[in-house]
Image: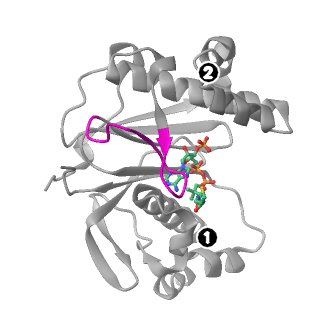
Amino acid sequence: MLTFKPANIIRPDINKLPELKSGEIHLFVFSVTDIFSRLQQLSSCLSATEEKRAARFINQQHGDNYRCIRGQLRTLLSAYLKDQPSNIQIEYEEHGKPFLNNKRQLQFNLSHSRDRVAFVFCRDSVIGVDIEFMRPQKNFAGMLRHVASVREQQELMALNEPSSFNAFYRLWTRKEAYIKAVGRGLGMGLRSIYVGTEPLETFTSVEYKGQIQSNWQVLDVTAPENFKLAICVNSEELQ
Ligand SMILES: CC(C)(COP(=O)(O)OP(=O)(O)OC[C@H]1O[C@@H](n2cnc3c(N)ncnc32)[C@H](O)[C@@H]1OP(=O)(O)O)[C@@H](O)C(=O)NCCC(=O)NCCS
């Protein structure tokens, strides 16, 4: 069992990457606009499958953003694995979660929203991340019914603006980080998950279908202005 603490979330300098130790999480948040100047270099390490996917975007800017994000992911993975970015073999689980075939070596996940992309890396625990731009919702009550469990809806309804708006995005990013850590995605049913709405200061267990999932733990992390960011890890060490 690993004990994750907020202090173990490290935001390394990409040019001076420290060793990633067991029980630590490395977090990077980039502005896609900032990395866009390296589009050509970042695109050059993509696999044929990734290049095909980039070419399928109808909007060329979206395709180029995907190239930048994938290139940046490969650059980071290559720094951890001490290999060329183009040599990294990325595979996909049943519901689309990307992973490295040597799972014990390095776990990772990524999330993008508007101009921001977040990457998380971890040695020996399953991990998920979610970043969301806090867009005002025209139909807040409808979104709430779609995303929040009955208990969370009651907690949120008891709050006033802007607390309810912040609390909504806190719970949304926590839930998405959880379903991405598990890897099953939205098929898990967001309303079957309870992550609460109060700010979290330590990693806290998720509830799924009324059962506490003591291994699956979520935490809010400081995000860029107008964004929310959450991480979920599984405290059981991978064998
Ligand atoms: C995972 C999911 C919740 C992400 O939604 P989102 O909020 O729009 O996207 P985010 O920006 O946070 O994350 C996207 C990234 O997460 C990763 N990802 C994709 N599927 C994932 C999954 N099931 N679990 C964890 N991570 C996943 C990818 O790297 C993706 O980035 P990419 O598309 O640039 O490669 C959503 O795509 C989902 O539910 N997927 C499952 C769909 C499914 O079951 N498909 C079955 C056939 S593949």
Q: Residue at x 57, y 18 (%)?
A: 45
Give residue 121's position: percent from left, percent from top.
Answer: 36, 37
110 to 207, vertically: above or below: above
Q: Residue at x 45, y 76 (%)?
A: 193
How many other residues sit within 10 Å of disc 1, few (<14), some (14-19) or many (≥20)? Answer: few
Give residue 163's position: percent from left, percent from top.
Answer: 54, 68
Q: Which mark is residue 212?
A: none
How many other residues sit within 10 Å of disc 2, few (<14), some (14-19) or many (≥20)? Answer: some
Q: Earlier in the sequence, mark 1 or mark 2?
A: 2
Give residue 94's position: percent from left, percent from top.
Answer: 51, 57
Q: Is residue 27 visible?
A: yes
SS of the residue under disc 2:
helix
Of residues 22 and 31, which is closer to you in this image? 22
Q: Amino acid at mark 2?
A: Ile
Q: Amino acid at mark 1?
A: Glu
Q: Residue at x 53, y 62 (%)?
A: 185
Q: Residue furthest right?
A: 58
What range of the chain is rendered magenta?
91-105
Q: Residue at x 50, y 50 (%)?
A: 97
Of residues 6 and 27, which is closer to you in this image? 27
Which residue matches tag 2? 35
Of residues 121 and 6, which is closer to you in this image? 121
Which residue matches tag 1? 161
| Quadrant for the N terminus in the image | bottom left
